[in-house]
Structures are given as structure tokens and as C-alpha cells.
Image: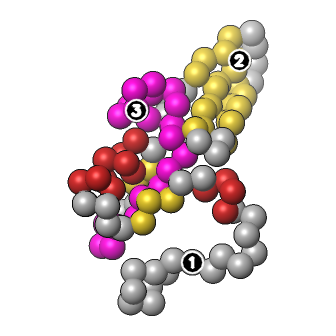
Amino acid sequence: MSISCAIDFGTSNTTAFLAEGNYVQPVRLDPLNKDPFLLPTLLYFHEGRAPVYGASAVVGYLEDNLTGRLIQSIKRHLPAQSFEGTSFGNGAA
């Protein structure tokens, strides 16, 4: 029997489920979130560090005194043909 994965990539939250036969199980996507089965659809970029996502994105943004780039509603921006990248003032994408 094969295992299937279903992902709901939402504007606000993302969820995932694994299914095998009649057995369906949610996937823990974000251990820092109040509901670990929901991943807030957020990305946070801060110069010189690896990007973070979900609840960690909010924590990082707040700890960095609202600096860096917090991207919300990612799904709405993906189809924009005009998007070429982002930079931190030094031309780096």
C-alpha cells in the first residue's frame, strides 16, 4: 500500500496530511506554533542569517525590533511576474 501526502498551501496557514489506506494523519509542521499542525504561511529574512518560517518568523521579526523582511500572504505574491527579488540595500538578492 502506498502513502500519499496532501498539502493545503494557504494564504494564512499551511497544513499537511499523510494517508495510507483509510488511515489519515496530520503532520506536525511547526512545533513553535500554538497548534503544531498549522504552519503560519510566513517567511522572515534578516541579512546574514538563514531565513525562518512559520511561528519562528514572527519571533525573529519581533526579536530583531521589526527589522529585516517579514513576508506575509506569500501565496498572493507568487504569480506576480514583476517580482525579481529582494535586497538589503547592498544589491544582494
Q: Vertically, is 29 above or below 67?
A: above
Give percent across and percent down for residue 68: 36, 67
Q: Is residue 37 left or right of residue 49?
A: right
CB under 8 Å between discs 1 and 2:
no
Q: Is residue 31 left or right of residue 24?
A: left
User: From mark 2 to mark 3, how far is it between C-alphas?
Assistant: 26 Å
Q: How many marks?
A: 3
**Disc 2 residue type?**
Glu
**Disc 1 residue type?**
Gly
Q: Which residue matches tag 1?
A: 85
Start-end of magenta stretch: 30-49
Q: Which residue matches tag 2?
A: 20
Q: Which residue matches tag 3?
A: 33
Which residue is rendered at x = 66% and y = 41% of the image? 10
Label 2: few (<14), some (14–19) or many (≥20) C-alpha neighbours in 10 Å? few
Q: Nearer the viewer, residue 11 or 9?
A: 11
Q: Nearer the viewer, mark 2 or mark 3?
A: 3
Snapshot quadrant of residue 17 = top right
Give percent across and percent down for residue 89: 39, 86
Q: Nearer the viewer, residue 84 or 65?
A: 65
Which residue is rendered at x = 24% and y = 54% of the image? 63
For the N terminus, the quadrant is top right
**Disc 3 residue type?**
Asn
